[in-house]
Every structure is written in C-alpha cells, then in structure tokens.
Image: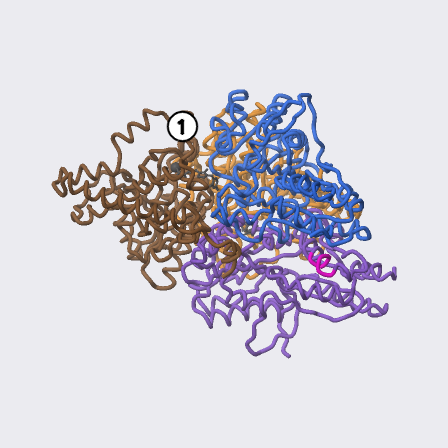
Chain colours: A purple, B blue, C brown, D orange
Amino acid sequence: MRELTFGQAIKEALVEEMRRDPTVFIIGEDVAEAGTVFKVLSGLVDTFGRERVIDSPISEAGVTGLGVGAAMTGMRPVVDIMFGDFITLAMDQIVNQAAKVHYMSGGKLRVPLVIRTTMGATRRSAAQHSQSLYAWLAHIPGLKVVLPSTPADAKGLLKSAIRDDSPVVFFEDKMMYQVKGPVPEAEYTVPLGVADVKRSGTDVTIVATSSMVQVALEAAARLEGDGISVEVVDPRTLMPLDKSALVESAKKTGRVIVVDEGYEQYGVTAEIAAVIAEGAFDHLDAPVRRMGAMNVPVPFSPVLEDQTVPTAAAVAGAAKQLCGRA
Amino acid sequence: MRELTFGQAIKEALVEEMRRDPTVFIIGEDVAEAGTVFKVLSGLVDTFGRERVIDSPISEAGVTGLGVGAAMTGMRPVVDIMFGDFITLAMDQIVNQAAKVHYMSGGKLRVPLVIRTTMGATRRSAAQHSQSLYAWLAHIPGLKVVLPSTPADAKGLLKSAIRDDSPVVFFEDKMMYQVKGPVPEAEYTVPLGVADVKRSGTDVTIVATSSMVQVALEAAARLEGDGISVEVVDPRTLMPLDKSALVESAKKTGRVIVVDEGYEQYGVTAEIAAVIAEGAFDHLDAPVRRMGAMNVPVPFSPVLEDQTVPTAAAVAGAAKQLCGRA
Amino acid sequence: METGTQRAIPAIPKEELLQMYEQMLRIRIFEEQVNELYTSGKMPGLAHLYIGEEAVAVGVCRALRREDYITSTHRGHGHCLAKGAAVNQMFAELLGKAAGYCHGKGGSMHIADPETGNLGANAIVGGSTAIAVGAALSAKMRGTNQVVVCFFGDGAFGQGVLYEAMNMAALWKLPVIYVCESNMYGEYTATREAAAGEVLARPQACGIPVKEVDGQEVRAVFAAAKEQVERARRGGGPAFLICHTYRFRGHHVGDVNRSSYRSAEEEEAWIRERDPVRLLGLFLIRQRLADASALEKIDQTIRAEIAAGVQFALDAPYPEPGEVTQNVYP
Amino acid sequence: METGTQRAIPAIPKEELLQMYEQMLRIRIFEEQVNELYTSGKMPGLAHLYIGEEAVAVGVCRALRREDYITSTHRGHGHCLAKGAAVNQMFAELLGKAAGYCHGKGGSMHIADPETGNLGANAIVGGSTAIAVGAALSAKMRGTNQVVVCFFGDGAFGQGVLYEAMNMAALWKLPVIYVCESNMYGEYTATREAAAGEVLARPQACGIPVKEVDGQEVRAVFAAAKEQVERARRGGGPAFLICHTYRFRGHHVGDVNRSSYRSAEEEEAWIRERDPVRLLGLFLIRQRLADASALEKIDQTIRAEIAAGVQFALDAPYPEPGEVTQNVYP
Ligand SMILES: Cc1ncc(C[n+]2csc(CCOP(=O)(O)OP(=O)(O)O)c2C)c(N)n1
Ligand SMILES: Cc1ncc(C[n+]2csc(CCOP(=O)(O)OP(=O)(O)O)c2C)c(N)n1
Ligand SMILES: [Mg+2]
Ligand SMILES: [Mg+2]
C-alpha cells in the first residue's frame, strides 16, 4: 500500500471531503497561503480558494463561535486551532455553545463542526505550547473527541468527523505529522467509537492513545524478546469510548497498562482505568497501571521535558513488573 | 456551637482574612453593593470600601488575568466568578497563566490567587448555569482545587486558600448557601489536602464531594435501618488529594461508591475510583462504583433535571447492591 | 458619527404600525403573565423580563424577513415573539413542558426556533456575538441574502469575544447587525461604571457604521434597522445599532430591592414617559390611524391569546423521563 | 488624535543616547548570536528574533525605573535586556541550563526576572494584557508609584482579552502603558488583513489616550514613552503607544520562505533605510556626540560581553533531573 505522512493523510481527508461537500470549509490562523504553521494544509488554498480556506485573525474564541454559527445554519466548518493549549481561549464557545446547542434546542439545531487542534510535548515549546488537554473535552456531554494515532486512522477518522452531525474535537500530535504509514488509495472512513487492536497479544494489554500508541508498540516489540506477549489497544476516540473492546482485551490478558500523553491527574488514564476495573474486575491480576504525562507544567529544558512523557522503556518496565518479571 | 449558613461562613472567612492581611481584596461582577447575585458578600463593601471590594465589568478573562497580575506583585486577590460555567471564559488565564507562572519562572514568581466560583445543578438554570467543572482544574498541575461541603469546612478551607501561595480554585455549591451548620467562634483554618471522615462505618465507604456529602449522609442514615454501616469520606480538596485517607477507608470496608456532581464521564469519580482501585486492590470485594452527574447537558425541565444528579435513594440503592442486599 | 436620532422618521403604512403595536403588546402581556407564573411558583428557574424594551425587538424584527436570523440573550422572550414564535410553545417551554420549543430542555434562557430564524437565546453574556458572525458568513457562502441580527445587552461590552466578532464581521463585510439593547445596567451595575469611554466608538473603531436611536420609539428603531438591514442585504457589510432603552422591572423577577443601583424616580420617569407601547398608542391616536376602541380591541384579542397560551402550557404534559438522555447527540 | 510623530523630539543628554545605542546594539548582537545558536542546533525550541525592533524596547524601558514592571511576549528577548536582564542568564535560559533566569524551565518564551521588574514573557498572544492591568492595580493599591508597560504585537488586536483589559485600565485610571509593536504582521498574515478599521481608534474608544511613533527612532519612542509614563505615574491613567516597526527576520528563525506574505523589496528597504541601530549611530555622528571609533569601541565591548555570555551558557550545566518536579507549587 502507498505510504503517506500523518500530515498528508489529514490533508487528503480534507481535500476529499471538501470536494464531496461544498458546505465544508476551513478557517483558522495562517491556514491559507502558509498552510498552517505545521505546513499540513500546504496548497489547499490553491485548490479551493480563499473563500473556503480562510485566514483568520488571532481570535480563537471568535473563530470557534463563528464555526458554531456557520454549522447551525447549513455549513460544515473545520476550525483550526493551532496549538491545543489555545483551546483554553475557546472553551465557552466549545463547551457552553457547540456542545449544548443541540440538546438545549430539544434537538432542533445541529452543530456539525470539527475543531482540529494539536497536542503533545517534546518539541521544547514549554508550558504554554505542549499540553494534551483532550480530557477536558471528553468530560463534556455533547462533544466527540478523536485521537488518531496513524496516518490511515487520521484520514478515516477525520472524514467521519466531518460527516458527523455533532461537534467533534480532533487532536493531532504535532510530533507525528512527518511519520509515514500505509493509507489505502480507495475511499474509506473509520467510524467514531470503534477501538482498534494495533497488536494482539495474550499477557498484558496496553491501552494507548495518539502519540502513545507508537510508544506502546515499541514497548511491545522489546517485550517480545522477554517472552511477554503484549496486546496494544487504541481507543481512537475518547467519546464515544469503545468500552467493550477495552474490557474484552483486559479480560483476555488480566493485566492492563493505560498510557496517555495528557497529565495523569484527573486525566484520560483515570477514566479508562476505571472503566476496565469495573468491567473486568474479576479478571484482573493486578490493578490497572496508569501512565500519563508527569503532573508538572511542561518544562522547556530538554533534560527536564523528556522525563515528563512516558517512554517505551518505562512502559516496558511497567509491563514486566505487572507480569512479575521485574 | 453557634450555627452559620454556608454563605455566612464564607463571608466570615473573607472578613477575617481581609482584616488580617491588607493585601487581600475581592473583585468580580456585582460583588460590592449587590454583595454578589447570591448575596453571599452582602455588607462586605460597607466594611472594606470599594477599594477592596471591587465591582468589575462582565469580563471573566480580564478579571482573572488582573488577579494573576496583582497576585504576582504582592497582593492576594480573591476573584469572584459568578457561575462555575463562566470559568470557560477564563481558562487561558487560569491554566496557561496562573497555574504555570511559578513553574515557568523557575520559582521566582508566585500567584497567591483565589478564584471563588460556584457549581451545582437543580436550580432549574439549564445547561449554561448548572455545571460542576472542577475536574478540568484538578487536571492541571499548578492549581489547587477546593470543594467544601459544610459551613465549617468552607470557612476553614477558604482561609487556607487565601493564605496559600498557589492559585486555588474554590467551588461553592449554589444550593448550599442557605444550609446551616456549626462553625467555631475561635480562629481556625482547615488545611488543604486533608480528607475528613464525615461519618464512620464498616460495611461500605461512600466518597462524596461538595453537594454530594449531604446526599451520602442521607443515604447512610437510611442504610442504618437496613443494618448497613456506612463510612462517608469527604476529600475536601481534589488537589492536593488525600489519597491515603481514601485508600484506608476502602481497605477497611472493602466496598466503595464515589459520588460527585460533575459529569461522570472523564470526571472526578474516575480519578478517585482509579486511586482506590490501585491502592486497595486486594481489599475490594467489588469494583468501585461511580455515581456522577448524568452525561447530558443539564436540562431545564425539573422532571428532567432531577434525574441528572445522584440522589440519596439512588446512592442507598447502589450501596445495598454492593453489599449484596438488593 | 452617522446617527439616526435627528432624522425624520419615514412614514410607515398604517397596517404595519398596527401590527407593531400588536406585537409590542403581545410581548408586554406575555411578560406580565410570565411574572405572574413566576411569582405564583408555577415557573421554575429565572425570568428576565423584557417589559419596557419591546420597541427594540419589534422594530428590529419588523425589518427582517422570516428567513433572516436572530441570536438572542437571557432577556430573550421579546426577541423570540417578535421574530414570530407562537405564544403556546413559548409558555410551554418556560414551564418545562414537552410541547415547548425545546421540549422543555432549554427553558427561558435558551428558546430556539429555527423555523422563524431564531438561532437561540444564550445565557452567556456576549455568547452569541461570534455565532452571529458565523451565521452571516454561512449566508454569504450559501449565496442566500439572509441577514443576521445579534441582540445583546450593554453588559456585553465587557466581553472580549464581542470585539473578536465585530472585527471579523467588518473584515469580511458580513451581513450582521449588532443591536445593543442599552438599558443602562448589567444586573446591578451601571454601564457607565463598567464600560469606559464612548461605547459607540468601539464598533466604529472596527470600521462598522453605527446608528443611535431612541429605543422606546418603535418607529425610529424600525427605520434605523431597516436601513441597516437593507444595506447589509445589498452586501454593504455589518452595522451597529444602539437602542437606548430601559428595563421597567428588575434584572430578573426576584430583583425587588433595586435602590442600591437605581432610583425609584428614575424608574417611574421611564415608565411614565417612555413606555414604548403607550408611545405608539398615542401616536396612532394622534395621527388618527386608530382610535381608543380599536386599540382596546387589539388588547382584548392579545389578552385572550395569552390566556389561552398560558392555559395550554399549564395543561401540557412534562417530558417523559426517558427524554433526558435524548438529543445529546443527533 | 494626540500623536507624537509631528512633534519635535526633546533633546536627550549625550550619555543617555550612548547608553541607548549600547542597549540596542546589545540586543542586536544578542539576537544574532541566538540565530547562530539556533541554526547550529545548539538552542532547542523556537526563536523569535527582535532584530529590527530594538528601538521600541530600549526607548520604552529607558522611560522606566527599575522597579517599574513590564510584561513581554513570545518575541521578548529585547524587552528583557532593555529592562536590565544580564546576558549570561539570558543565554543560559535559552539553552535550557540551570543557570538561566528560569532554571531552564521557561526558555525563550517565558523569561521572567522580577529583580528588574520583568513579570515574564508570555507565549499566548495577548496573554499578558490583563496581567498588566493587575500589576497596575496592585501598584496603586500598595501605594507605590510604579508604572507597568505591557508590550504586545499587532497580532494581539485579534484577542478579546486586550479589550477587556484596556476597558478596566481606563475605568480605574490605572498606571499601565500599552505598547503595541506594530510590525505589520502576525506570523504569516498581514495585520491589515486581520484587523479591521483604524486600530488606534480601539484604545481611544475606551478613552485611552494614544500616541503614534516611528518605532525605528529610539529618541522618538523614548520621548513619547516618557511623557506617557510620567503622566501615568502622576495618576493620569493608562496610555497607548503604537510603535511602527518591522521585524527584519522571519517570524521565527525557521521562517525562511517569506515571499508568500511579504516581499524581499519591502524587507530590504526597511533594513537599508530604517535600521534603528544605524539610525541612532548616524544621528550620534552627525550631531558630533560620538565618532565612528567611539561607536566601534562600544561594538567591541558588546561583542565581547555577548561572546562571554554564550560561552557561559554553553559551559553551564543542565538542571538536575529531579528539578522537574520542583516549583509546581511554592
Ligand atoms: C459571561 C457571563 N457573565 C456573567 C453572567 C451573569 N449575568 C447574566 S445577565 C447579566 C447582565 C447582563 O447585562 P446586559 O448585557 O446589559 O443585559 P440586560 O440584562 O441589561 O438585558 C450578567 C452579568 C452571564 N450570564 N454570562
Ligand atoms: C492565543 C494565541 N494564538 C496563536 C498563537 C500563535 N502565534 C504565536 S506568535 C503569533 C503572531 C503574533 O503576532 P504579533 O502579536 O503581531 O507579534 P509579532 O510576532 O509580530 O511580534 C501567533 C499567531 C499564540 N501564541 N497564541
Ligand atoms: Mg443592560
Ligand atoms: Mg506583529
């Protein structure tokens, strides 16, 4: 199969959906000629023009609200928020408006809005440009939350997100944009709410999200040498969450590690651990092990920052311990 | 002991701290002559004047940022955000600024800021005025998060919050303002990070926060008749979280319910359940049972809204089930 | 500054004037009933009455077509009714009944009615200012010539998103009219203590043309709105209309001790001299467009309609419990 | 509009002018070294160079006392240095070393130095505009006569919090000066495509007096800032200073293909004709306040200082791993 980078896969999804549906448009800071600061959208404006690829002022709240209004009235906007840290500025529009309009109106209004934003540390971008804040959005009924981990998933999930009638927040790991992977040529979508077993195994389950899927797969490869068979499950969407897939895997292996790049405290690992602890209670040999980002603002200095994100070595170590091999 | 309402206890804490420390001041919408829309601060402006009890424009982000700047330069501001739902507008200032300044500056700057805001449904205020969003803040390193459940705790915790050198977000249940309880006359504080056993028991632990403590106590009273002895543990602060108190109680009873008024999905019940599942793994007879608010935007209609918040009956039912009595 | 106050108000056909009178009166009597329902414990939640401000909603919405959009506020009943909402479903919503516009899920602060172009009330001050720009962009992209009106209160001058929104509306020449209901207060704080400088200079700084009108004169409001709406419809871009008005009652129904922020004399003077319903009634009579008995007849018709609406709502069933989990996702 | 451009610039003592020259040159050479460190892979993260804008930071900070406060931006090295930061600790911070101003935790976009009144750079556009008001309120409440300068870029006109902040500053007459570094672009977008209307009218709409200066003329910047700072110190309230300037390099060091948003001719013209360091150097020579060799000597001294600073930082140790969990809470 042909290979695309994560960034290319995202662009391809947008191109296809914009071709397919004239109500889809993109708005955000430096999305047009600049093609975003990450160059993910390079050339898109040449294809669709400035009417459908719109450079905005630096107004995260305003642009998100604009997306809500456009979505309520027949368009399918894709709002680009450059860094996930900047959703802090748009939380009222995302949470009090986008997420609630459908419910508050008794189902009369819909907000088919996609907010594409980023996540992830280790770019030495320090505390205000490195956060992975999706746990906040997953907490809010009315929103869907997508965390793709491969180019193929990114493409298929983004297409589903655009076609979805709910507001969807789509988090892209900045460090993954250049990573390549196979992407089918033929049209396809990946449904929201279906987990994917990225590797099957029998001894221990690693539930991993976004950037941490690769880390989990690396850990799994290392553990193979130690005779430990790892299953890696990627929920792909936090909301809807494919609870049964997580629980099934946990029942099979009896040992679970949850790895995620959001802050560990009150984060995604807690929900997933709780879901598994409840659903697979009698099958667990040990408590679900949580590994999130360290509970500190992300520091600038590389020697500090690199400690804050789970590594393959750390995950492998935890797995060995869980399996009584450490 | 004399009784005060929850609201009076909060006011008393502010009065005492403002007397004690001239750098403490209050700012927010309608805090002065109006004494807040909940009338919690009535009369405060008469005592301390408009220089220290400052009515602000309707500018949640601006006022919070103002609090950060004042806190960095020698003051101890108490910022009043009328409804907890409006912190959505101030998340950048709370999360990217207040929470991170100390760390980003390598410890050189401090932000001794208190943000007082509200939480809780069942006032028929609908989806934008009823949320309990503290899980977001508990997710962020650098913040402390307080959820008082009684007048005495409210007073003692608020005094500690004001004296703390970190930014503290203090959530008050709107439905509790008129509730009375004993409050010592003599000066005291309640430390942040120490849970309180509101009732001791042996069969089942109910961990309950804020508004849900009363619900848990009511459930406990009902269960007494059924011969079920309930321990009610109130963490009082989500950050720092008194993990050992939670785990100890869980070890003692072997059965745990966590009750909280935030949305259940990716909320506080998940973290607490995960902490307990990890810390008391071998002592649990059943999975930790989570009871948060229903995962829907809070509806207006009373018949709908009342279903969304855990009730004493529902908690008691869950406890019976846990104890094999249902 | 391009203001509309001094200009002569263009003549408006009698039929239209009578309809405006009727609409204002409908809002007035509707709100009086809301007050009644609330104080008698039949209406849950909060009630922010529009009494005193009727000319704004009616004058502005008269300048709109059914397919044009509005966004509304916590004080939104008047906007909804003026845009064409039915009294029955309004009352039903206020009482949390299944027959309400939002099936009881929204309540007073969230009434939405896409059929009449009402994109919904908003309980967040300033919360719909950017949504309105989005609806305007959408209209432009879809090639309709719909216009959007964003109603908001003078308290919203404190909210940053208003400026973000106006800036985008101006940059892209979008068909949105910002209608400020300048009633001098936001809750219990005077706007002069909350907004520095000249508020009208704020939209102007974004290059948005402004008009200033007496918000108690529905004819003036209508004339100004009409000009701005037509200009927007022709592709002339956004506009800003400030309507000087006054809420005759408290911020919400429970706000009874108002002396800490405004005087009884001030209230009485407005009510006595600047009642928009009375002002139009007097005009109609003086101009011999209607006589007292004609107005009285309108009054009776409306009262009957409102009474029937209240009864409809009181009799209507609550939603089924199971509806609580519906409509979270489409 | 009260603008400062046309007025004659008051005479500034020679000593001061030479110090300003030295400060601008220090920033220039510092930034050239940053570029070098970055392109040679020694500096992690992002580097937003201040080259071309030195006169703004130096002219403004010259008008401040050490105990006055500044807040800064992602393009903040110049502000820090102009307010008195030491080159060694600056470089150390940029390289993530323990000896840096923030012990390596902040990096380029977060340098704070309370000892020189620097409340910190901010990587959120507009993120410090309200913090500055808070510092000004604090100064007033504590009864000091400190003044606060909030540096921000023209891109921040898009951020709502700026208007919330200016409104409060004006309402309460707080001693804060908003200094807009109007360099015509925010990242890769021209400000004229991102900010509608007349930007200077925005602070004015809040009742904040404005001045407009040639941001390449440090003497003009200083004179305007001085007047505003003194007025604020006397209790005259906030002010707004727009400095027309230009970043000579890319948005950050990696921004090399700039033709999609600005022309090479435009850049060359600014660099050739409007270099603030060169302009002051020429003035000094023409006014016979210094000769070429005196300037050359300053240049050498600064280069030596910078070289030593770089070496200090390169040699300095990284933080201990355990420091990662320190300073989350005091
Ligand atoms: C963002 C936000 N902050 C505060 C409130 C609480 N609140 C509700 S109405 C109101 C006053 C609004 O004043 P204005 O906009 O002038 O409208 P009016 O009530 O006068 O019609 C306030 C502060 C809110 N709903 N939203
Ligand atoms: C709230 C926010 N949105 C977007 C960004 C990304 N960003 C960083 S710098 C910048 C441009 C800022 O332009 P301006 O304020 O003019 O400053 P300049 O870079 O020109 O000095 C942008 C959009 C950010 N840091 N913060
Ligand atoms: Mg008002
Ligand atoms: Mg700029």
The reply to whether residue A283 is in sight is yes
Q: Main secondary structure of the magenta part?
A: helix
- Tell me if residue A279 is in the magenta stretch: yes
Camera-nearest residue between A308 and B214: B214
> Residue at 18% across / 41% down in the picture?
C295
Q: Secondary structure at mark 1?
A: loop
Q: Quadrant of the N terminus of chain B?
A: top right
Residue A79 point in image, percent of width and height? 50, 58
Residue D26 point in image, percent of width and height? 64, 42
Query: What residue type is disc 1 on?
Result: Arg
- Tell me if residue D58 is in the magenta stretch: no
Magenta segment boundaries in residue numbering: A275-280
Quarter of the displayed picture in which ligand 3 can be seen: top left
Q: Is residue A220 left or right of residue D31?
A: right
Q: Which residue is labeled 1 in the image? A: C258
**Is B155 drawn above or below residue D79 in the view shown?**
above
Q: Is residue B49 left or right of residue B322?
A: left
Quadrant position of residue C292: top left
Camera-nearest residue between B291 and D223: B291
Camera-nearest residue between A42 and C250: C250
